[in-house]
Image (cartoon, rainbow, N blue to C red):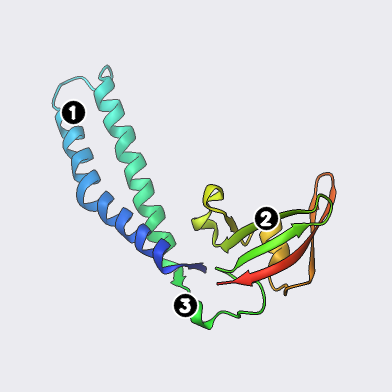
Amino acid sequence: MEYLSQQRYDELVAELRHLIEEVYPKVREDLAETSAQGDRSDNAGYREAKRMQGKTISRIRFLQKVLEHSRVIRPEVLPKDKVSLLSRVEFTNLATNTRMKYQIVSPHEIDLEAGKISLKSPIGAALMGKRVGEIAEVQIPSGILRLRIESITL
């Protein structure tokens, strides 16, 4: 079971609809067109159309499976006093005294440029369930990273 924000769920539904209603019919049309050109063994266009068909079908099936096994999280039922999915967490790296701020999201919503990290990442997993003032310890290759939670918002 995966939990998604309403925004990400809607994005996945829109992508699936786009693939099914627009992309796949075009891929099928391209495949039929290149197939009609004759010898398939020496037809680069046909091979490319088959590759695109496989890629499109694979993405459609993946999205269907994700959506089938996902639930939309209602932010109002999440705890406000400890780190949970969709929390925005500001913390300080105690070794460097550097402050960072990330939102904890599902693996399907990761976007480092937007400051979104997975709850399954080492840092995300260490922060889960912690409260303001607590220290999360993260095992990294060079040792243990200690992070003090400064604030939690939704």
Quadrant for residue 106, please give it: bottom right
Element assignment for label 2: strand
Measured in 3D between alpha carbons, the distance from the residue under mark 2 to the one under mark 3, in whole angstroms, is: 25 Å
Q: CB under 8 Å between callouts 2 and 3?
A: no
In whole angstroms, how far apart are the C-alphas of marks 1 and 3?
A: 49 Å
Q: Position of residue 134 (x, y in %)?
A: 79, 71
The disc labelled 1 sits on which kind of residue?
Answer: Ser
Please name which of the two marks, 1 or 3, marks the residue nearer to the observer: 3
Whole-percent x, y for residue 100 in the image: 67, 55
- In this picture, is 44 found above or below 68? above
Badge 1 is on which residue? 35
Answer few, some or many: residues within 10 Å of disc 1's Cα (few below 14, many 20 plus, some between 14 and 19).
Answer: some
When asked about the image quadrant of residue 65, the answer is bottom left
Question: Residue 150 at x, y = what percent?
Answer: 72, 67
Q: At 61% from the left edge and 58% from the top edge, which residue is drawn?
A: 102
The residue beneath circle 2 is: 100
Contact check, label 1 and label 3, Cβ < 8 Å: no
Element type at mark 3: loop
Q: Earlier in the sequence, mark 1 or mark 2?
A: 1
Going from the N terminus, do you reach mark 1 or mark 3 first? 1
